[in-house]
Every structure is written in structure tokens, then in C-alpha cells.
Image (cartoon, grey):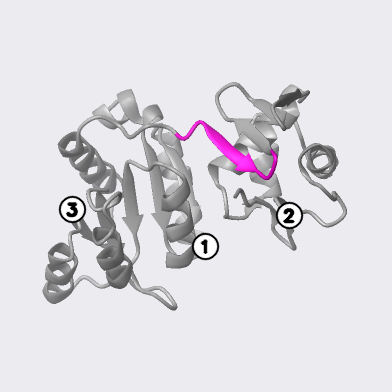
Amino acid sequence: MSQAGSGASQRHLLVVDDDNRIRDLLKQFLSRAGFRVTGAQDADAARRLVAMLDFDLLILDVMMPGEDGFAFARWLRSQPGLASLPVLMLTARGLAADRIEGLTLGADDYLAKPFEPRELLLRIEAILRRAGPPAGIQRQVRLGTCIFDLERLELSRNGVLVRLTEAEGQLLKALALSANAPVERHVLASSGADAAGRAVDVQVTRLRRKIEDDPRTPRYLQTVRGVGYMLAPD
């Protein structure tokens, strides 16, 4: 295994691409390489995620509706706490002028689509070697009066531990790792939560009773119709 594979489990990547198919393929490929991977469908979702979670590298599309990748990179480099976050631009805009603009805005590398997956992995490895040790891992998310510890799989409410089954803990962790982004049911079912089909819905109902003030109108564990569920921490 390459160097990324040997230490990838400690590396958290954010894939920002409005193309659901490409985003899902990248998440699957990079997850198999050993990385923790979170996806965002646009710059707004990415902005929320980088404000809440620590990432070691952003893989950023350029051509997105609304704010494009160039504008997002410019914003990222203007933020004191995020200015040094490594960025690899992955885009169909492969002209020399586009590459120059991306690198001028502070991208660490620029790879044009279509690309070879192995080349992408090698470029990620190179960037991470230059970046140094991995960023700290976000260990907790806040859900109103509740705090969920992703490593211990512990949920507390007003400082008091709330009992979670192993399956509920794994399900909540899977949602927290993709916070503010929808997670499909089949992904949740394969997250180690020992849940399949409608069993995911049953576990979500139980979790809502434990974290929501009003489980009938959930604020934090939201249903995304036709897709699955999304966790929206404070």
C-alpha cells in the first residue's frame, strides 16, 4: 500500500463537487484507499463543513452552480483559520489559463478531468506529505442540549449520559461524519450500524426520541426525501 494507505485513516478529505455521480465515485475510491471522506454538493455546504470539522485536504471542483471553485478558494485563503488548508482542484477546466488561475488563488495542485484515479491518489499523497501531520479529529458534535462523542459513541444530554445501542451509535457517527450533507439509506445500512432497509428508519426514530426536543418536528436529525437522512449540528 502507498503512503496514503499507511496513514490515510487519520486523514479526513472533503470532496466538493455538484455532480452526485462523480462525488460518490470519489468518496468510494478514496474510502477504499483508507481515507475518511465527507462530501459537499456546493460551496455553501463546504463552508458549513469546514467551519465545524477539521479536514486535511479539500478536493474542489471549479464549475459549480452559484459560487464556483475559484471564488470558494479565494474565500478559503482569506480565512485565518483555514488559509493553510491544502486544496486540490479537480475540474474539467483544463486550459493553462485555468490552471494558472487556480494555482494563483492558492490551490496546492490542479488536476483536469478526466483523470486516472491512481494519479489522483499520488497527487493527494504528495500534498499531504508537504502539509505535515494530520489535522486534529473532530471528536464531538453538539445537538442542542446533547453532545455526541464520535470516538466513544457516547451521547449526553444536559451532562447526563443517554444510553445508545451499538447500532444507534454507529448510525449517529456515520451521520456526524457527513454533517450537513444528506446520507443515503444504503450508505447508512453499510456503516456498521447493523441496519438494513426500513431498519434504518426505525433506528432514526429511536435516535430522535433521544436528541430532539420534539421528535415529530426534528431539528437535528432531518429526513431528506428520496435520499435518506442528514444530521445538522449546531
Which residue sits at x=32%, y=25%? 7
x, y percentage for residue 51? 43, 52
* Camera-side mark, 3 or 2: 2
Asked whether, in this view, residue 60 is left or right of residue 180, the answer is left
Tell me the amino acid under the disc marked 1. Answer: Asn
Q: Which mark is residue 219?
A: 2
Q: Is any part of residue 116 visible from this angle?
A: yes
Number of marks in picture:
3
Q: Quadrant of the N terminus?
A: top left
Q: Toward the viewer: 205 or 18?
A: 205
x, y percentage for residue 54? 40, 41
Tell me the amino acid under the disc marked 3. Answer: Asp
Q: Is any part of residue 92 visible from this angle?
A: no
Q: Is 80 above or below relative to 29?
A: below
Dot 2: what SS? loop
x, y percentage for residue 146? 69, 37
Counting residues from the N terminus, which is met first, the one under dot 1 or under dot 3? Answer: 1
Counting residues from the N terminus, which is met first, the one under dot 3 or under dot 2? Answer: 3
Q: Is 122 above or below relative to 230?
A: above
- Say which residue label 3 marks: 108
Dot 1: what SS? helix
- Say which residue label 1 marks: 20
Q: Residue furthest bottom?
A: 66
Magenta stretch bounds = 138-145
